[in-house]
């Protein structure tokens, strides 16, 4: 299963309908094919394997990733009330997701899911799916890429009804479709670990990942003895260290190394399965070269043969220069509500340096305003002057 587009209407934090495309909007030249994943030859459809969402602080980048994660979870049969990203629904009376995807049988599908909220006895919020429809069409019968999302004149193949007594009201009825097509998404998310670095106990950590992140480490692995888990850590030329608490690793390894092990291990799995990896503030705890290395893994079509997809947010415009194209980048802004706009709609030319365009302010809302900076500067000056006077 590959997701082409996610639309969400009625989200409290968003100004308008959120509309995100994951397929290439601009013309694909021969050179571009090296960093894209072709999912269809007729019509010719390419997916972005590294989708960037960039914005200043408090622009809503994390909120956008939560919407994406929730949409992926819906079509992956996960109960909405068990997904951490459900908080993006807030107390909305009615939220409608429209998710376009290509399933394992090469059918182009459109799932429309309507969600409502109600307050529980404990004061929290519970979410239920009240209406749902599924449309299908043969992908090979679509004449052009522009016609991909057009389902005009096509009747739904399935409609959610009250007879589905064995289906929880927070699980999409897409579960029946997925069972029939033997379809499933592999979703790895680091949304909950942006500022937390804890290595979970696992059977194997790639030596190549460890050497890439910290060449002073000779080995790092886990073992189990009498139902107890241990971490074995050894630096070159040093005695082995044995720990029984993953949090204690922070005494010996940098936060960047720990997060790197988690992130690159997930990336390896996603590249293998063709799944999705979601990372908020990708540069957090990493230097630029490590981030660029991660992007290059996903943007290498010779390596990424299964269409593994990286979806990330960032503050750093320099990362945008890793892109030869504009349509894999979205600008997130918060001006009386969160908006997301594809960079290809704002910059028609691919040859303009993206970091310069972002930092120059020609893309409105991508830099702190000059007036806000001057007010901050005056506040600092008054504070300093007041201390000197006293």
Image (tube, rainbow, N blue to C red):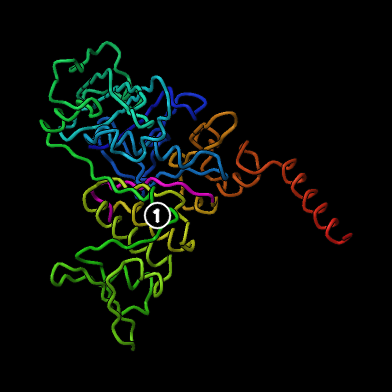
Residue at image location 87% in from the left, 60% down from the top = 390
Q: Position of residue 160 (x, y in %)?
A: 20, 18
Number of residue marks: 1
Horizontal arrangement in the rendering, residue 215 relative to residue 381 (left or right)? left
Residue 231 colored in magenta in the image: no
- Mark 1 secondary-structure assignment: helix
Tell me if mark 1 has few (under 14), some (14-19) or many (20+) residues whose alpha carbon lies within 10 angstroms of its own: many
**In the orientation shown, which residue stands out farthest toward the bottom?**
237
Q: Position of residue 153 (x, y in %)?
A: 27, 10
Q: Position of residue 282 (x, y in %)?
A: 44, 53
Give the magenta range: 303-315
**In the picture, residue 136 is in which quadrant?**
top left
Horizontal arrangement in the rendering, residue 127 relative to residue 256 (left or right)? left
**In the orientation shown, which residue stands out farthest toward the left?**
180
Quickly name the residue at label 1.
295
Residue at image location 24% in from the left, 36% down from the top = 78
């Amino acid at each position: 299963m590959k997701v082409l587009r996610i639309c969400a209407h009625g989200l409290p934090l968003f100004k308008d309908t959120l509309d995100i495309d994951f397929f290439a909007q601009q013309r694909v030249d021969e050179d571009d094919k090296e960093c894209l994943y072709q999912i269809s030859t007729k019509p010719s459809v390419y997916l972005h394997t590294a989708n960037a969402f960039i914005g200043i602080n408090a622009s809503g980048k994390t909120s956008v990733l939560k919407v994406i994660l929730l949409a992926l979870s819906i079509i992956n049969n996960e109960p909405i009330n068990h997904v951490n990203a459900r908080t993006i629904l807030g107390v909305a009376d009615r939220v409608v997701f429209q998710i376009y995807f290509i399933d394992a049988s090469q059918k182009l599908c459109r799932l429309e899911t309507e969600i409502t909220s109600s307050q529980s006895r404990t004061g929290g919020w519970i979410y239920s799916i009240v209406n749902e429809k599924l449309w299908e069409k043969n992908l090979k019968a679509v004449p052009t890429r522009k016609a991909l999302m057009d389902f005009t004149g096509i009747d739904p193949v399935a409609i959610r009804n009250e007879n589905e007594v064995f289906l929880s009201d927070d699980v999409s009825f897409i579960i029946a479709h997925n069972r029939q097509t033997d379809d499933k998404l592999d979703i790895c998310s680091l949304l909950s670990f942006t500022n937390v670095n804890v290595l979970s106990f696992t059977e194997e950590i790639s030596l190549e990942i460890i050497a890439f992140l910290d060449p002073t480490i000779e080995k790092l692995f886990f073992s189990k003895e009498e139902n107890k888990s241990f971490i074995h850590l050894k630096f070159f030329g040093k005695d082995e260290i044995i720990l029984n608490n993953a949090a204690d690793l922070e005494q010996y390894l940098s936060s960047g190394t720990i997060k790197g092990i988690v992130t690159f291990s997930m990336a390896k799995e996603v590249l293998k399965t063709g799944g999705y990896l979601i990372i908020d503030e990708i540069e957090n705890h990493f230097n630029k070269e490590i981030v660029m290395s991660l992007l290059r893994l996903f943007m290498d079509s010779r390596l990424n043969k299964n269409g593994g997809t990286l979806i990330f947010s960032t503050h750093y415009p320099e990362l945008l220069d890793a892109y030869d194209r504009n349509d894999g980048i979205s600008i997130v802004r918060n001006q009386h509500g969160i908006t997301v706009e594809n960079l290809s709609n704002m910059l028609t030319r691919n040859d303009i340096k993206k970091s310069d365009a972002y930092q120059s302010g020609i893309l409105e809302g991508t830099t702190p305003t000059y007036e806000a900076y001057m007010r901050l500067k005056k506040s600092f000056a008054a504070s300093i002057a007041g201390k000197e006077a006293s």
